[in-house]
Amino acid sequence: MDKENNLFFSNQFALKYDELVGKQNWYGAEILLGMIFNYLKPKDKILDIGIGTGLSASGFHTLGLEVYGLDYSNEMLEVCRQKDISVDLKQFDLNDTPLPYPSNFFDHISANAILYFIDRLDNLFEEISRIIKKNGFTLLKKIEFIAENFQMEGNSVSFILYVTKANQ
Ligand SMILES: C[S@@+](CC[C@H](N)C(=O)[O-])C[C@H]1O[C@@H](n2cnc3c(N)ncnc32)[C@H](O)[C@@H]1O
């Protein structure tokens, strides 16, 4: 799917997104939270890149973290805003670096089911290393799943990226 179609899709299906994902039996949010649970502390600042409706981010909020989110779809962000799980949400195209945060700002950065939409991952990863606090490590995981409702053909790949500082 190209960028315009994807943004159109995000805007059009924002209100039904959680329901559609539920019907897909997608457990990406739970898998991500399970992998990083031991590293999270209340009041830690976490940026969710491509936060969407906040499906992955809601677990961070439940654990008491300060959730920041970026997404280029205003409609997805509006659904997320209604959930009241974040301290800051910004509309932002992730192909347009630099990211709108100071250096060494976040304890954690999460990007779930979003990286395959980005044209220049090298630019994004450079920015991630700038805004994450020092001594971070990176976990990159991919999960196969069928995404018929997302108008993709056959098996597609869901990338999960999680970055945190190593010395806590
Ligand atoms: C499959 S959803 C995943 C949402 C969320 N991370 C989650 O785990 O539920 C992908 C999200 O990425 C956003 N997105 C796609 N390309 C983007 C871009 N270039 N810049 C910002 N957001 C983008 C879409 O609007 C959508 O909200």
Image: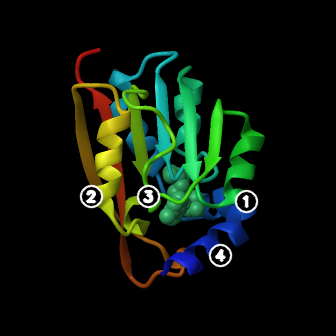
Of the 4 image quadrants, the one containing the C terminus is top left
Instruction: Give SS at disc 2.
Output: helix
Find the distance from the CA under tag 1 to the CA under tag 2: 27 Å
Marks 4 & 1, CB-CB < 8 Å contact: no
Q: Residues within 10 Å of mark 2 (few under 14, many from 20)?
A: few
Find the distance from the CA under tag 3 to the CA under tag 4: 17 Å
Residue 138 position (above or below residue 15): above
Q: Residue at x 54, y 33 (%)?
A: 59
Marks 3 & 2, CB-CB < 8 Å contact: no
2 or 4: mark nearer the eye: 2
Q: Position of residue 2 (x, y in %)?
A: 49, 81
Residue carrying label 1: 75
Instruction: Give SS at disc 1.
Output: helix
Q: Earlier in the sequence, mark 3 or mark 2?
A: 3
- Does the numbered disc 4 mark a residue whose Cβ is under 8 Å from ligand 1? no
Between residue 87 and residue 21, name the one nearer to us.
87
Q: Earlier in the sequence, mark 1 or mark 2?
A: 1
3 or 2: mark nearer the eye: 2
Amino acid type at mark 3? Ala
Residue carrying label 2: 122
Residue carrying label 4: 8
Amino acid type at mark 2? Asp
Q: Residues within 10 Å of mark 3 (few under 14, many from 20)?
A: many
Residue carrying label 3: 113
3 or 4: mark nearer the eye: 4
- Does the numbered disc 3 mark a residue whose Cβ is under 8 Å from ligand 1? yes
Instruction: Give SS at disc 3.
Output: loop
Q: Residue at x 40, y 22 (%)?
A: 40
Q: Residue at x 65, y 29 (%)?
A: 87
